[in-house]
Image: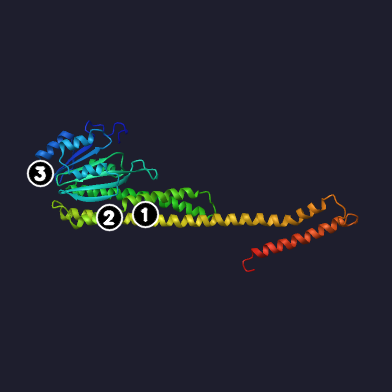
Amino acid sequence: MLNPPESYGADASGLICAYQFCPDSPARQVSGPQALHCLQHDESNGFVWLHLNLSHVATEKWLREHLQLPVEFYEALHEGSRSTRIEHADQHLIAIINDVVHDFSYEASDISTLWVCASEKLIVTVRRTFLKSVDRLRQAVNQGAQLQSTAELLSHLLHDQADVLTGIVRQLNRQVDDTEDALLAGRLNHKRARLGQKRRVLVRLQRLLAPEPAALFRLLQKPPRWMSDDARQELRQATEEFAEVLRDMHSLQERIKLLQEELATVVNEQNNRSLFVLTIVTVLALPINLTAGLMGMNVGGIPFAQNEYGFWIVVLMLAIATGIAAWLAFRRRDPDA
């Protein structure tokens, strides 16, 4: 179970968790000093994973004092642009991965960044807020997942991220299905603003995540020396899976766009019908209002004033005039006219 936010990652160094991975055995959770001792004295083919909270004031200082990470990693922590990418730096892999927060509610702002620095013996992940993909990775490690290299752990993280995004796309698909069913059934109680919100979320996710497959493909062309062929294949599969999720997101975005256009068309048709009814009522009432105004003037010479059947003559004339006006109005409504 996750600790509350105020205590989650409350280590004095900002360390959330640390794991030591040994070949063909489950990971062992260790403390910060134990992890540093493993890095300095472990001669096996294992590696260490450190996961830290960048919101903690001591995190970056602890990293600089105890780990020899490339300067490009620290620059990435402070730069404004956080588009997804993976690059080389002195036999290290530096990855900036955008992910959804743990309690994601489809708000366009509920996306945060995970910074990763990986070498042969060490992988460091740093974040500011709860992230779903990292939490899924921690659960897998706690349940005994055996990861043989830092590249395999990175691949597992990318697979988890793709799974989270797949779940988001599936849930959005169900909501769009409900809106589409309501549209076909003639129930327009779904606000178009909700569709617009979903579309904005998809656009933001695509904008932040779309560079990732291209960056990974470039990495696979020139991987670090310590990356094995199996690890390269795992990363390739993760890249293909992620690219498929992005294609699904693009298809859903286009579907929402078409649905918005259909809803706008239906609303316009309803407005046109309402305007037509209002026009008909106005046209039919025009002869009556005009005659009443003329007959109501207190001047001499009003027709039929002395006629015994004057009232019925006026009524007959109004009926004829109203009928002609109605025929003309409906005749213009006829598209074949």
Specify the quadrant that holds the C terminus: bottom right
Residue at the (48%, 52%) spot, across then down: 179
Asked whether, in this view, residue 286 is left or right of residue 173, the answer is right
Kindly give the residue lying farthest to the front in the view shown. 299
**In the image, what residue occupies the spot 50% across and 48% down?**
191
Asked whether disc 1 touches disc 3, contact meaning CB atoms under 8 Å apart, the reply is no
Q: Are marks 2 and 1 in contact (CB under 8 Å)?
A: no
Q: Amino acid at mark 3?
A: Ser
x then y, percent, for residue 33: 15, 33
Q: Position of residue 23 (x, y in %)?
A: 14, 46
Residues at marks 2 and 1, CA–CA distance in whole angstroms: 14 Å
Q: Residues within 10 Å of mark 2 (few under 14, many from 20)?
A: many
Q: Amino acid at mark 2?
A: Pro
Relative to 282, is 215 on the left or the right?
A: left
Which badge, 2 or 3, is on the more N-terminal residue?
Answer: 3
Q: Mark 2 sits on what residue?
A: 213
On the image, numbered disc 1 is attached to which residue?
Answer: 249
Q: Amino acid at mark 1?
A: Met
At 23% from the left edge and 50% from the top edge, which residue is drawn? Answer: 86
Comparing 292 with 54, the one in front is: 292
Q: Residues within 10 Å of mark 1 (few under 14, many from 20)?
A: many
The residue closer to the viewer here, 293 or 214, is 293
Q: CA distance from mark 1 to mark 3?
A: 43 Å
> Which residue is tagged 3?
44
Helix, strand or loop at mark 1: helix
